[in-house]
Amino acid sequence: MAILITENAEEGSRTAARLVARAIRNRPTLRLGLAAGHTPTGLYRELVRLYRSEKLDCSDVRFFSLDEWMGLPSDSPNSFRSFFHHHLLDHLNVDPDHIHLLSGQPGPDAAASCAAYERLIRDLGGIDLQLLGIGRNGHLGFNEPGSSLHSRTRFSLLSQQTRRANARFFPKGQVPEWAMTVGIDTILEARFLMLLAFGKEKAAAVAKAVEGPLTASIPASAIQLHPAVIVVLDKPAAARLTNAAYYRREASHLETLLPDWLRQGPP
Ligand code: F6R
């Protein structure tokens, strides 16, 4: 696992966006898994800037989502679908047929639509690069504490902590009770994971995920099982790591920690 401790969230977002842009250049048909939430907004902003200033061609990239609130109307401004369009997809040269987002629609077909999403990811060749945030309670996607480390795409009951943390995004704080989420096993099948965390309120969860025991109580600790992960932090989010000095030394050789296809230059 490569742990990159950056000066601040802005630098972390810029560094992460450069890596994503490099992944797109090296592999123009990149299958990119997107996370929603506050954390990746700087990365998406920077990616849009690179698209405009460096003509980053995204026409062959496929986009997948990690999760979605359940039961919101499809045109709801609070949906992750709207979030992805607003922050990223509407600003790049994306082929609309290459956008694959979880529906979050409840009802008798919900389980079938989760299974269909898994099939779609598989049939399109799997996710190459999965972007991730982390909840203050250690959730990954909307896999809340207690989720099986072998979970697949399904609907998940949200913890009160998660609902409270997201109340500011909903009118009258009415956060849905349920979400659809890609499972932990599904996440671990991606070829490369990039987890971002900024701010001191993430420090405890980050330390547990990176240095604590592998446990379903901290779903993000599952990244320890993956052979190709980069964790991009700002200083406050890294504040509770005990091995920070080692991570800094290791990160000075970042290129050696990346999979071949993500290294500088053509694959
Ligand atoms: C969002 C997601 C969540 C968030 C996490 C952190 O797609 O999967 O796991 O990454 O809740 O949210 P923010 O970034 O708003 O702190």
Image (spheres, rainbow, N blue to C red):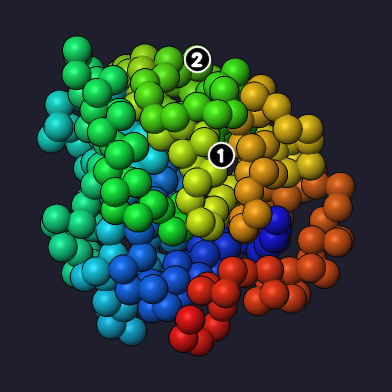
For label 2, the residue is: 160
What residue is shown at x 79% (from left), y 42% (from top)? 211
Q: Which mark is residue 51?
A: none
- State the SS at label 2: helix
Label 2 neighbourhood size at 10 Å, few (<14), some (14-19), many (20+)?
Answer: few
Of circles 2 and 1, the one toward us is: 1
Left/right placement of residue 53 relative to residue 96 reads right
What residue is shown at x 57% (from left), y 63% (from top)? 12
Residue 152 vs residue 105, the one in the foreground: 152
What residue is shown at x 40% (from left), y 53% (from top)? 127
Is disc 1's CB within 8 Å of ligand 1?
yes
Left/right placement of residue 246 relative to residue 35 reads right
Task: Name above or below for residue 59 compared with residue 69.
Answer: below
Task: Name above or below for residue 221 compared with residue 192.
Answer: above
Which comes before the other along the chain, label 2 or label 1?
Answer: 1
What residue is shown at x 78% (from left), y 35% (from top)? 212
Q: Which mark is residue 134?
A: 1
Left/right placement of residue 82 relative to residue 180 reads left
Identify the amino acid type marked 2. Gln
